């Protein structure tokens, strides 16, 4: 017969506390190892760039790096191939500020940096670095975001370079996010598995069925609030398709779904919803609600004339199938170019 021994009164609490201590220590150890790895690679890159390569010709650099790679690989293994050493040099070239790299290395792994450093445009690279830190992207998610051209799809890319830099700095230093960092166009909803013909109700149901993937496309700070939220104005009932809350923006977000082309009357409809929410639903400390009208197609001229995409209402196109990388790239680069031309013309007219 086995004798049962009574456990101490606080046994479970102590057990849980010890488990937390072990998990915290393991996380700290991983962060220390990762940070050390990144900083080692950065210092190797700095040493090679400033003391060996300097302004020497490319062919000379390849010869020197190849020679050094053979020596290091014999001593320390495959992590010091010629390609790896050139990536370390590129890390230093892209992130010359040692303090900044030290800060990043506490949150991003070397695998994150391997995805980020090939990005040639400095502001785009800063965007992906910042979003990785703020939204805690895994390497897989970062790769997916790059492949779907998230930066070019985000409204921030249509702004002047000074605005982009300032808004990224505010997100980094103050955790303050602008709506330009939230709004995108187009939205890639290829995960919804919709048939060729579908209704607005089908689209709405598919989004809720794949809510986790939808939120991932919209941003990690997105929180679902309601579907078909009923509001009553002058005795008449209206229904808001989808209502979300964005934690970092501190705003309610209306999403109105349309299966066809954008129509001007949608603006008045959504303005009514926003004013009702602002009056009756906005909590203390929140910013004014914003809206996203998602359409299968949209007319840019109509949107410009209605002065949308400058205030609290944004019109975005959704794609239920991912286009080819070449087609998406061409479409987005043209959109960015046209947006900056329009912005320049608007600024000239104001002056």
Image (cartoon, rainbow, N blue to C red):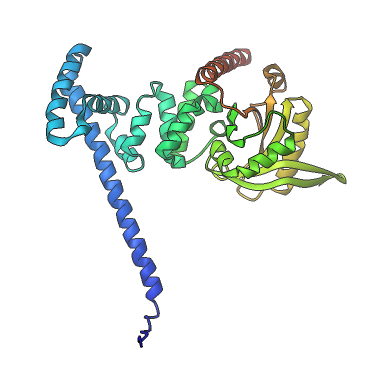
Position of residue 76 measured from the top left corner of the image (x, y, whole percent)? 15, 36
Q: Is 156 displayed left or right of 26 in the figure?
A: right
Q: Is 195 displayed left or right of 103 in the figure?
A: right
Quadrant position of residue 70: top left
Q: Is residue 237 above or below residue 301?
A: below
Quadrant position of residue 141: top left
Q: Quadrant of the N terminus?
A: bottom left
The reply to whether residue 289 is in sight is no
The reply to whether residue 292 is in sight is yes
Q: For the point 47% across and 37% down, which residue is it?
A: 171
Q: Is residue 148 above or below residue 10?
A: above
Q: For the point 29% across and 39% down, which residue is it?
A: 102
Position of residue 58 measured from the top left corner of the image (x, y, whole percent)? 22, 13
Position of residue 178 measured from the top left corner of the image (x, y, whole percent)? 54, 34
Quadrant position of residue 311: top right
Q: Is residue 219 or residue 114 the one in the foreground?
A: 114
* Number of numbered callouts drawn: 0
Q: Quadrant of the C terminus?
A: top right
Q: Is residue 190 or residue 217 the one in the foreground?
A: 190
Q: For the point 53% across and 27% down, which residue is it?
A: 156
Position of residue 66 measured from the top left corner of the image (x, y, whole percent)? 17, 21
Q: Is residue 84 or residue 306 the one in the foreground?
A: 84
Which residue in the rendered view is the most extreme toward the right?
235
């Amino acid at each position: 017969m086995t004798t049962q021994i009574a456990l101490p009164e606080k046994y479970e609490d102590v057990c849980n506390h010890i488990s937390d201590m072990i998990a915290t220590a393991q996380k700290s150890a991983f962060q220390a190892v990762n940070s050390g790895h990144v900083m080692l690679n950065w210092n190797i890159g700095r040493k090679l760039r400033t003391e060996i390569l300097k302004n020497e010709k490319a062919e000379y650099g390849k010869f020197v790096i190849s020679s050094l790679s053979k020596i290091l690989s014999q001593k320390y293994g495959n992590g010091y191939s010629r390609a790896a050493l050139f990536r370390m040099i590129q890390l230093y070239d892209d992130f010359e500020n040692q303090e900044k790299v030290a800060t990043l290395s506490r949150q991003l792994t070397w695998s994150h940096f391997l995805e980020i450093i090939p990005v040639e445009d400095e502001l785009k690279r800063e965007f992906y670095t910042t979003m990785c830190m703020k939204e805690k992207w895994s390497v897989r998610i970062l790769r997916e975001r790059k492949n779907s051209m998230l930066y070019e799809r985000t409204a921030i890319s249509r702004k002047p370079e000074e605005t982009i830099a300032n808004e990224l700095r505010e997100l980094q230093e103050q955790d303050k996010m602008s709506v330009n960092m939230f709004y995108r166009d187009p939205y890639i909803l290829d995960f919804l598995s919709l048939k060729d013909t579908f209704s607005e109700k089908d689209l709405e149901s598919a989004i809720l069925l794949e809510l986790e993937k939808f939120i991932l496309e919209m941003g990690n700070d997105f929180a679902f609030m309601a579907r078909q939220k009923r509001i009553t104005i002058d005795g008449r009932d209206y229904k808001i398709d989808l209502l979300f809350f964005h934690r970092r923006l501190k705003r309610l977000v209306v999403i109105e779904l349309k299966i066809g082309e954008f129509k001007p009357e949608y603006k008045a409809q959504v303005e009514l919803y926003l004013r009702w929410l602002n009056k009756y639903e906005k909590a203390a400390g929140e910013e004014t609600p914003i809206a996203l009208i998602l359409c299968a197609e949209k007319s840019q001229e109509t949107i410009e004339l209605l002065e949308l995409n400058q205030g609290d209402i944004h019109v975005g196109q959704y794609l239920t199938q991912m286009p080819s990388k070449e087609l998406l790239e061409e479409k987005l680069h043209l959109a960015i170019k046209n947006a900056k031309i329009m912005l320049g013309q608007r600024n000239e007219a104001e002056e």
